[in-house]
Image (cartoon, rainbow, N blue to C red):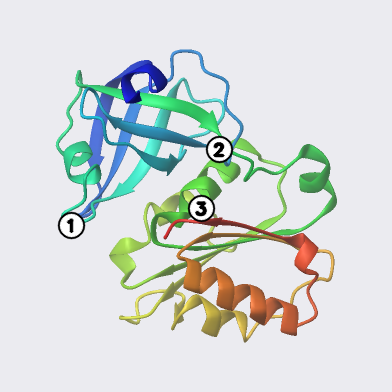
Amino acid sequence: MAEEYYHNIHKVLSNTHITESTFILRIERNGLEYTPGQHLVLGRKDEGEFRQYSLYSSKDDPFFEILVKEVEDGEVSPKLKKLVAGDEVEINGPMGYFTISDARRKAHPIVMISTGTGIAPFKSFIASYNDMNYELIHGVRTIDEAYERDFYSKNKLTVCTSRDEKGDFKGRVTDYLKTQAFDKDTLFYLCGNSEMIFDAMELLKEQGMNSNNMFAEVYF
């Protein structure tokens, strides 16, 4: 069944290790259409195990990129970590609805809240839409997990570090949100672990934000 369903074969173009456990896998796009915020279902060719990964690249890039953190004893990520240029993966997609319409993007300020590799779809949003009025909040344990932070405008990115003091804010994302005030018409996009997403949404609602303006993609 898996071989029938995951029928698109793509070659790996590069595998860039940015920390000991996290890497950027670049693969052939092969002309597939893509809306920022969508994901791929991906696995190593002929292995039969697949996982969902948000696309990390711009809609205008001629390739796909995903940001992967190796899961110890995982079925997929340790195998992806070992891939090199020329190896092949199987994918299905792109797919998903964690996207921003042109109308929403142009009419509202957007706050993107992420933890860990949950920053991936937001990198794609920012790389794809240069007209977006946004703020990006990234929660990590230590500053080395603030992946490619130099890509983002410094006045638009807040890195919250829970285990060192090298970020822009010492503490969790939810601690930072308690110190902030947002416009009532702000759209909130949240991506990362489920506990952060639930707690952040509750905090925002307590601050008077409209739950209909909150959109989430849960990683784990």
SS category of the residue bearing label 3: loop
Badge 3: how crowded within 10 Å, few (<14), some, or many (20+)? some
State the separation of the CA atoms marked 3 and 2. Answer: 20 Å
Q: CB of mark 1 within 8 Å of CB of mark 2?
A: no
Given residues 177 and 159, the one toward you in this image is: 177
Residue identified by numbered label 3:
152
Residue 122 percent across, percent down from the top left: 55, 50
State the separation of the CA atoms marked 1 and 3. Answer: 29 Å
Mark 3, mark 2: which one is toward the viewer?
Answer: 2
Q: Is residue 50 left or right of residue 31?
A: left
- For the residue marked with disc 1, what is the amino acid? Glu
Q: Is 44 above or below relative to 71?
A: above
Work out which quarter of the rendered image holds the N terminus and state it: top left
Badge 1: how crowded within 10 Å, few (<14), some, or many (20+)? few
Residue identified by numbered label 2:
38
Residue 91 percent across, percent down from the top left: 38, 26
SS category of the residue bearing label 1: loop
Badge 2: how crowded within 10 Å, few (<14), some, or many (20+)? many
Residue 70 percent across, percent down from the top left: 23, 51
Q: Residue at x 43, y 19 (%)?
A: 29
Given residues 126 and 4, the one toward you in this image is: 4
- For the residue marked with disc 2, what is the amino acid? Gln
Residue 186 percent across, percent down from the top left: 77, 63
